[in-house]
Image (cartoon, helix red, strand yellow):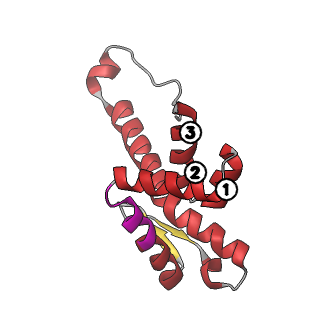
Amino acid sequence: LRHIAKTLGFMLDYGGTEFALSKSLGVSKEEARKLIDKYYQGFYGLAAYNTKQKIFVHKNRYVKTLTGHKRHLPDANCGDQRKEGYCERMALNAPIQGLAAEVTSASQVLIHNDKVLSALGCKMLLQIHD
């Protein structure tokens, strides 16, 4: 169950489809659709967010993080289904990953400038993602 949940979560976070999920889990597309529907029932608003992001990227050819940084996706309406699908997946993922990067960067600056940590001789050696 943990494997299914992790696979499902990551697939949807990165814009995966029922076809990709069925292939990854070795289940039918119908079973994958049921899993996706159940996932969205448990995370109220996520399906609406995904739809909103896809509409936004097709209209504007970019998406934004909560702090306003833009990820330009000029191929969102290029007519190539593969490229447009990629842009839709990025429209779902880029705002989340971008915000995570922004929070990490801001935290690193705060740690670097902290007088108490500096007085203790603390230095940031590395930052680990994930």
Q: Give the class, few, some or many, for how many residues have Cα within 10 Å of label 1's Cα (few <14, many ≥20).
A: some
Q: In the orientation shown, which residue stands out farthest toward the left?
A: 116
Is mark 2 in CB contact (under 8 Å) with mark 1?
yes
- Quickly name the residue at label 1: 20
**Residue 74 percent across, percent down from the top left:** 62, 78
In the image, residue 7 above or below residue 127:
below
Q: Give the class, few, some or many, for how many residues have Cα within 10 Å of label 2's Cα (few <14, many ≥20).
A: some
* Residue at figure coordinates x 70%, y 73% from the top left: 83
**Residue 123 percent across, percent down from the top left:** 44, 22
Residue 79 located within the stretch drawn in magenta: no
Q: Nearer the viewer, mark 3 or mark 2?
A: 3
**Residue 55 percent across, percent down from the top left:** 47, 79
Residue 17 in view in this figure: no
User: Which of the two residues, 93 or 40, is positioned nearer the viewer here?
Assistant: 40
Q: CA distance from mark 2 to mark 1?
A: 8 Å
- Quickly name the residue at label 3: 4
Query: Magenta segment range?
Result: 44-51
User: Which of the two residues, 115 or 106, is positioned nearer the viewer here?
Assistant: 106
User: Which of the two residues, 10 or 114, is positioned nearer the viewer here?
Assistant: 10
In the image, residue 119 above or below residue 16:
above
Q: Is residue 47 left or right of residue 19?
A: left
Residue 56: quadrant of the picture: bottom left
Answer with mark 3 or mark 2, whichever residue precedes in sequence.
Answer: 3
Q: CA distance from mark 3 to mark 2?
A: 10 Å
Local secondary structure at mark 3:
helix
Is mark 3 in CB contact (under 8 Å) with mark 1?
no
- Quickly name the residue at label 2: 11
Q: Is residue 41 left or right of residue 59?
A: left
